[in-house]
Image (cartoon, rainbow, N blue to C red):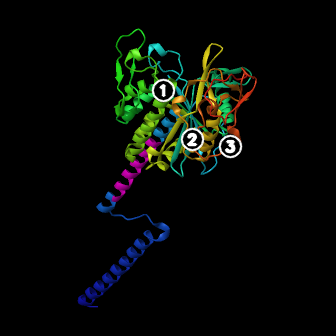
């Protein structure tokens, strides 16, 4: 074979070897990236996908932190409002039905300093019961006079503000349930210490002050805070606290309120209405801080979820439609002590209206609330639940013309001077002596 032929054969063999090596390498590469041996891309991730992954991770961290913050906030609120009161006779509320809330006042929570040195160890005797209808966005409140004479199981008759002392909150709940013919579902104790901060958190409240009042002690000539009477007085926390607690008018020489304890409970109801108006007017973004502030002055068996649901359901409520009243009472000196007795013929109608969600004074056009706490000169009867008297017998019919009251409104007072009896249907206002049973 010539030299030229050998050279040509070598080139052909070289090309063949090169093709075989190429096929071998390609097959190896295919095997390396086969589904059973996949090891991913060998080149770097694109910049766009790196950014997307970073955003996802950042969002995850933010959401996790937010979740932790919300959880801590929720737990803090739950711990703040959780009560230590051993109240075991509260009824479970029916779904989507009106429910009843016992509202009580206290000067200081356990572990707090008293509001001031003159009230150390003192507990407020403010007692109210609210009927709440979330579907209708309607709230009605009854103030229970602290001096109301009631039958205390195992202890005879006494003022209702002493019921807790004898039988705890359970006895108070059962007494109110029997009196109002309801089943209380929730309780809330409002602490004046935190109440002050709540009003300041709201930026103050605008409230009617029917009669001037002031914060003073009997050994002081000038009070620190004076609240003038007015239809729309703007109050900060300290001023609102004075209005809620004080029982004396201003100027100082006028002494106690002209309308007695009725004026104090009226002030408290006006404040509740004013606070509700401010709360419901708040922007939704401010609700968490507001609820936290509220939790510091309230102890309740309502859950945080329930409170938030209540706030949302009542949003947009016409606060002016919120109605409140003190129970209709007269009063008498009993065993040397001034005690309140129920105007039964008025109460029977008011309580019926209350339970049915009607205006509290419906069919009571001729009832004059100025007779609240009026001296009935021992004209009362100790009933099975509370002491009562007759407005009709002492002041004339309280009813709207043409209205027929229920049987529970009928009261008969014994006339000790003649041995006869006086029916509540009478319009006489003469003083009659009752029998104490």
* Left/right of residue 397 with respect to residue 237 in the rendered view: right
Q: Is residue 87 visible?
A: no
Dot 2 or dot 3: first in sequence order is 2
For disc 3, the neighbor class at 10 Å (few under 14, some 14 to 19, many from 20) is: few
Magenta stretch bounds = 52-70
Q: Nearer the viewer, residue 149 or 397?
A: 397
Q: Secondary structure at mark 1?
A: helix
Please state which of the two labelled residues, at mark 3 or mark 1, is closer to the viewer: 3
Q: Whole-Å distance between the Cαs marked 1 and 2?
A: 23 Å
Residue 264, which numbered label? 1
Please state which of the two labelled residues, at mark 1 or mark 2, is closer to the viewer: 2
Residue 364, which numbered label? 2
For disc 2, the neighbor class at 10 Å (few under 14, some 14 to 19, many from 20) is: some
Q: Residue at left 48%, top 26%? A: 264
Q: Nearer the viewer, residue 107 or 228?
A: 228
Residue 57: within the magenta?
yes
| Residue 247, horizontal then vertical, whole percent | 47, 21
| Residue 238, horizontal then vertical, whole percent | 38, 25
The residue beneath circle 3 is 406
Q: Secondary structure at mark 2?
A: loop
Residue 432, which numbered label? none
Q: Quadrant of the N terminus?
A: bottom left
Q: Nearer the viewer, residue 37 or 182?
A: 182
């Amino acid at each position: 074979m010539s030299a030229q032929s050998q050279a040509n054969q070598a080139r052909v063999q070289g090309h063949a070897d090169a093709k075989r090596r190429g096929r071998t390498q390609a097959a190896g590469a295919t095997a390396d990236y086969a589904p059973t041996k996949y090891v991913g891309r060998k080149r770097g991730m694109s910049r766009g996908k790196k950014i997307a992954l970073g955003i996802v991770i950042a969002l995850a961290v933010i959401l996790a932190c937010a979740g932790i913050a919300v959880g801590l906030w929720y737990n803090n609120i739950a711990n703040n409002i959780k009560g230590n009161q051993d109240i075991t006779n509260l009824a479970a509320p029916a779904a989507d039905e009106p429910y009843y809330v016992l509202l009580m006042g206290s000067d200081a929570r356990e572990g707090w300093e008293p509001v001031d040195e003159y009230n150390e160890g003192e507990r407020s005797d403010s007692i109210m019961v609210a009927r709440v209808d979330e579907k209708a966005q309607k709230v009605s409140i009854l103030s229970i006079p602290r001096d109301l004479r009631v039958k205390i199981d195992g202890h005879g008759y006494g003022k209702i503000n002493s019921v807790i002392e004898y039988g705890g909150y359970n006895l108070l709940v059962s007494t109110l349930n029997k009196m109002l013919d309801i089943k209380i579902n929730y309780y809330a104790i409002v602490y004046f210490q935190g109440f002050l901060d709540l009003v300041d958190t709201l930026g103050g409240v605008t409230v009617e002050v029917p009669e001037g009042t002031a914060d003073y002690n009997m050994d002081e000539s000038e009070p620190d805070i004076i609240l003038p009477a007015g239809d729309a007085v703007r109050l900060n926390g300290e001023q609102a606290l004075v209005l809620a607690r004080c029982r004396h008018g201003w100027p100082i020489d006028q002494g106690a309120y002209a309308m007695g304890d009725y004026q104090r409970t009226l002030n408290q109801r006006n404040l509740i209405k004013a606070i509700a108006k401010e709360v419901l007017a708040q922007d939704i973004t401010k609700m968490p801080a507001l609820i936290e502030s509220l939790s510091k002055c309230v102890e309740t068996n309502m859950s945080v979820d329930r409170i938030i649901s209540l706030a949302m359901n009542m949003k947009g409520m016409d606060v002016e439609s919120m109605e409140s009243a003190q129970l209709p009472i007269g009063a008498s000196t009993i065993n040397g002590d001034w005690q309140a007795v129920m105007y039964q013929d008025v109460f029977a109608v008011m309580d019926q209206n209350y339970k049915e969600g009607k205006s509290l004074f419906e069919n009571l056009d001729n009832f004059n609330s100025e007779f609240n706490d009026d001296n009935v000169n021992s004209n009362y009867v100790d009933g099975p639940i509370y002491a009562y008297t007759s407005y009709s017998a002492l002041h004339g019919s309280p009813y709207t013309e043409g209205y027929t009251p229920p049987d529970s409104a009928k009261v008969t007072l014994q006339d000790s001077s003649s041995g006869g009896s006086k029916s509540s249907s009478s319009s006489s206002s003469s003083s009659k002596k009752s029998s104490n049973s």
